[in-house]
Amino acid sequence: MKIAIPVNENDVKTTVCPSFGRTPYFLIYNTETRESSFLNNSAAASQGGAGILAAQTLVDQQVESVLTPRCGKNAADVLQAAQVKLYRTMNDSIEDNLTAFQAKALSPLAEIHPGFHNHGGK
């Protein structure tokens, strides 16, 4: 299973980014092979609709779950339409969240905000 996490840097020691659509990178982790890769989020530079574009990119990558501290409604709609599950991160540690996900200890992301349209998501 492929999962994605918005992250601040293209580095294994990076942290979870608080923004979904404007995150600079996504960490893509394969739970079967335990391999990680980083995906440049080109949607971060878009004038609007960054969350939708980022979500579609993850759908195109065949991601099945997203671990994120928050997500806007438009992005969540794209992900949920593709049956991608959303989970709320527990802190900013990549390792802690991957461990918690595999132990089924992360909660579903229930609070979907209306979005930060044209405000950079920060």
Image (tube, rainbow, N blue to C red):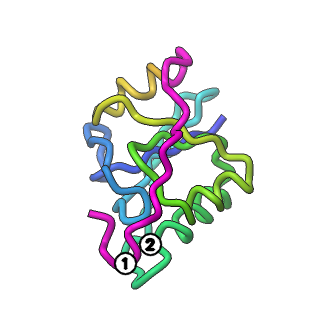
Question: In whole angstroms, how far apart are the C-alphas of marks 2 and 1?
Answer: 6 Å
Q: Nearer the viewer, residue 77 or 58?
A: 77
Q: For mark 2, does the 10 Å Cα neighbourhood hold few (<14), some (14 to 19), or many (20 or more) residues?
A: some
Q: For mark 1, does the 10 Å Cα neighbourhood hold few (<14), some (14 to 19), or many (20 or more) residues?
A: few
- Residue sitting at x 42%, y 81%: 46
- Residue sitting at x 32%, y 43%: 16
Label 1, secondary structure: give it.
helix
Q: Nearer the viewer, residue 45 or 76?
A: 76
Q: Quickly name the residue at label 2.
A: 42
Task: Count up the numbered dots.
Answer: 2
Q: Nearer the viewer, residue 114 or 119?
A: 114
User: Where residue 60 sits: x, y (%)?
Assistant: 67, 61
For residue 92, which quarter of the picture?
Answer: top left
User: Where residue 72 sits: x, y (%)?
Assistant: 48, 59
Q: Is residue 69 magenta?
A: no
Q: Quickly name the residue at label 1.
A: 45
Q: Magenta span covers which residues? A: 101-122
Residue sitting at the far bottom: 47
User: Where residue 61 sits: x, y (%)?
Assistant: 64, 55
Residue sitting at the far right: 82
| Quadrant including the N terminus | top right
Do callouts 2 and 1 mark residues in contact (Cβ within 8 Å)?
yes
Q: Nearer the viewer, residue 90 or 3?
A: 90
On the rendered structure, is 105 left or right of 30? Answer: left
- Residue sitting at x 50%, y 18%: 105
